[in-house]
Image (cartoon, rainbow, N blue to C red):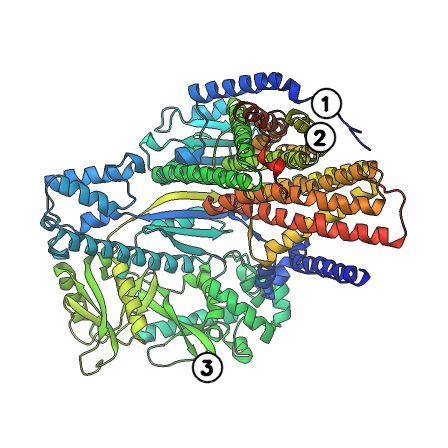
Amino acid sequence: MQFFKTPNLDFVSKRRIAYFISGGLILASLITLIIQGPNYGIDFKGGTEITIRFLVDEGEISINEIRDVFEGTPLEGNEIKSFGSSVDYLIYIEQEKGVDNTEATQLVYQILTEKLPDKTFEKLGEDVIGPRIGSELRRATIIASILALFLILVYIGWRFELIFSFGAIIALFHDVMITLGIFTIMGYELSLKEIAAFLTIIGYSLNDTIVVYDRIRENLKVLRSETLETIINRSINQCLSRTIITSLTTFVVVLVLFLFGGQVIKGFAFAMLIGVVVGTYSSVFVASPAVLEWQSRHGGKGRLKMAKKKK
Amino acid sequence: MRKNSLIKTIFVLVVVFWALYALYPTYQLYTMTPEAKIKLEDEGKMVSLVDKSIRLGLDLQGGMYLILEVDLPALLEHLADGKDQRFEELMTRVRSDFEMDINDRPVHTDDFLKLLEYRFSEAGVSLKEYWPDEGDSDKMILDKLKDEAKDAMDRSMEILTNRIDQFGVSEPSIQKVGAHRILIQLPGISDPDQAETLIGKTAQLQLRLLEKTEVMNRILKRIDETMARERGSFARPAEMISAEADKDTTSQQSETIERKDKVIGIGDLFGDAEIKDMEEAEMDEEESTASDSTLVVDERMFQSNPFLALLGEYREKGHEVSAPVENIKAVNRILERDDIKKIIPPDVEFVWASETYKRADRTYRDLFLLMKEAKLTGEYLIDAKEGVGQSAESAGRPIVSFRLNRQGARIIGSVSKKNINRRLAIVLDNRVISAPSIRSKLGANNQITGIGSMDEARMIAIVLKAGALPAPVRIEQKKTVGPSLGQDSIHSGQMAALIGICIVVLFMILYYRMAGLVADFALIMNLLVLLAVLVQFRFVLTLPGVAGVVLTIGMAVDANVLVFERIREELRTGKTVRASIDAGYSRAFTTILDANITTLLTALVLYQFGTGPVRGFAVTLSIGILVSMFTALFVTRLIFGHITARKILTKLSI
């Protein structure tokens, strides 16, 4: 079986359309992130998060019912979310509610037991993050992300050429912005696990990008008389089959993870899901054309150094 | 060429067998029936099986993760003298600095003392005004305060270790994190609330009188008689193991026992392994190889004196009653029974010693009968120090001296005067540290003698001071995962992995035919080796770790896809099958290397900065990538080599 026999699609000439789409998406993401900001999860904002499960036999319970329970108590107005089903709920209490972290959990259980005497619930889990830990985690995450990016760029710069690093940065920025935007619009929370997902998206998108770059590098040596545009186009086409298949298998497993992986890693899987699609798109339409743009603007008439290198 | 490929084949087979061997205990553990589990627990072999199986993170098996912070500001305030309004104002400011994000602090530091120094010198206040005892210059005082802080940290670790040990979690982990934090991980605990109370409460030092030896002996004898009567006719240990769990309601108990032979048997006593003392668990294992039963009793004595037999016959001065550590749980079970509780007078209780000691190849723990009322508590203690005895009887031997404040001295004075020659137990967190006899009236300065070694003396001094812990600990971070959430996660993780594998495997066969089958073999091998590496190197599998495994499934085939596409290309140019395979592999190699190294770099950074669950993800992802390089390139290449070696193929099913 074969999806494409010998594809010869002209991606490069259509790059302007791609720029338009990407630019639009990035702009939309930026606006969302500036106006609304990402929904930080408990790891970063601190506070107390309690997950409870009501006994299924006693029937469903609605969010409003639970919300009413806390009315008139010190915990009034706390955040209540469904945790994947109509009996599992997540209760979040902010740091500044004037209640001590450890007391807050006890208070929640006490209120629930008193006000819902005919309901039985089970404590699924508790998460308490002090204010200082929250800010420390934020700092560590930023350092980790910057370090990861830096290492990758150094590696690409070393293995390929600086211009490729530039293309890769553009593609990464593109992927992370768009994924984060969609992630935020869809209402998912950003916690440590999701940061891990974003870093993996970076790795994955690079993986795709590098495969194409590698082919460009190879073709530069073989097809010396061709223009860079032709070489890039041919390289993308040669890799297309692989790009589609790998993206497909990865997409499918992530989709399975999203559908069946359980509530705890839903956000993680969602970020990966979007990331795989955007990452695949960017390696074809953004990363390689970016090299071309840079070269045509700054590289003058000269060829890429790599074409001359023996290696 | 032939020989070379034989060696390679053997190598691959060895890896496969190793992986299967490493994974077998895990397979055994997770396919076992509940009955078989109970049986294995009774035999004491469960611990070693769990040890050889894959380790699950807190998010999968349930449990508790805590980060405690020693409250430094409170400690420093406690140490300060002559606190006035200016002091309070300055301290409030330092505290609020400390609560801020590091970038907003006046000095960008994590060090509370530096913030303190900054605010005090800004206000032109010398530290000597409030901490005169700690040194002459600001620098000296700061150094001394730093030592005090470190000391407080050590003491907190000591108390917490002691308490958690008492709580009996199977694999607790207690670590220092940075200068002022303690990370505690309690996997698989069933009652996080109780654990938190235990950890959160302040250490209690108590001085309590021992009940007279005659009284204790009388009570022990009555317990023994009750137990003996209840057992009635002697049941063989084998029957006792199979006996149903005792649900002893006091009223109807005696009848049920006589009819159904429901006794507290060896199996019953040890069947309940929910909360298992580490020490016992270890002993369990050793003992189980030596004998059938896990309790250490004299068989004949056990028949006539079932309770006293548990305590063993060993007696010597200072160790009136003791039990081999293997029997402690059984003894506790008996002491907690309602009918036995009735025998023990309400004003006394049995308390175990904190230390164990070895005699004739057995480890014992002393048991004391103490008055419930504490004559004195830690709040009266000012200081404790280890040292070497000066008096005639303790000359040259390790001692611990402690000092009480005036009120404490008055209380202990009157208590000791009335109880000369009785023994006074020093109890910390409900464990007896030592129980010296009162020789004369006691005052503010006291000594604990009869300590085995200097190390032990130091420990007791630490523990004594710990009782008067100046700095409270605060819970900075807590994560508890209930067992059912963990179960849910395991279940959905397994399901996702299974469905993911099936889809990818089917797709590869559909798309690449025979070559796809080869890639599938590599994929399955990749997963087996990945899991085996996790088991062998004791990595912890977390839920994001499972996600990493699933992701590996998707990405591991990538290497093969790259190679296969390349082979197809080469075939199209008209090369022979063998030449195409060779070219495909060698051309795709650099691409695969470059692509995987970038992902590996991200995983390494994640490992370095991430905590618990995220680390698990980084681990499985990195191992998955590394293993996939081996299986997807080396192993598949070898298989193709075998296929093409048989006969010269003109067509390749790819």
Residue B404: % across, % down: 17, 62
Contact? badges 2 and 1 (CB < 8 Å): yes
Secondary structure category for the residue under label 3: loop
The answer, for residue A244, to whether it is visible in the render is no
Q: Nearer the viewer, residue A4 or B183?
A: A4
Q: Nearer the viewer, residue B607 or B491?
A: B607
Q: Nearer the viewer, residue B518 or B433?
A: B518
Q: Are marks 3 and 2 on the same chain?
A: no
The residue labelled by disc 1 is A9
The residue labelled by disc 2 is A240
In this rendering, the answer to whether B485 lies above or below B239 is: above
Mark 3–mark 2 Cα distance, whole angstroms, equals 75 Å
User: How many residues crowd around disc 2 within 10 Å: few (fewer than 14), some, or many (20 or more)?
Assistant: many
Q: Are marks 3 and 1 on the same chain?
A: no
Q: Is residue B505 left or right of residue A308?
A: right
Residue B428: % across, % down: 31, 61
Which subunit holds the residue at mark 3?
B
Residue A140: % across, % down: 41, 40
Q: Which mark is residue B360?
A: 3
Residue type at mark 2: give it. Answer: Leu
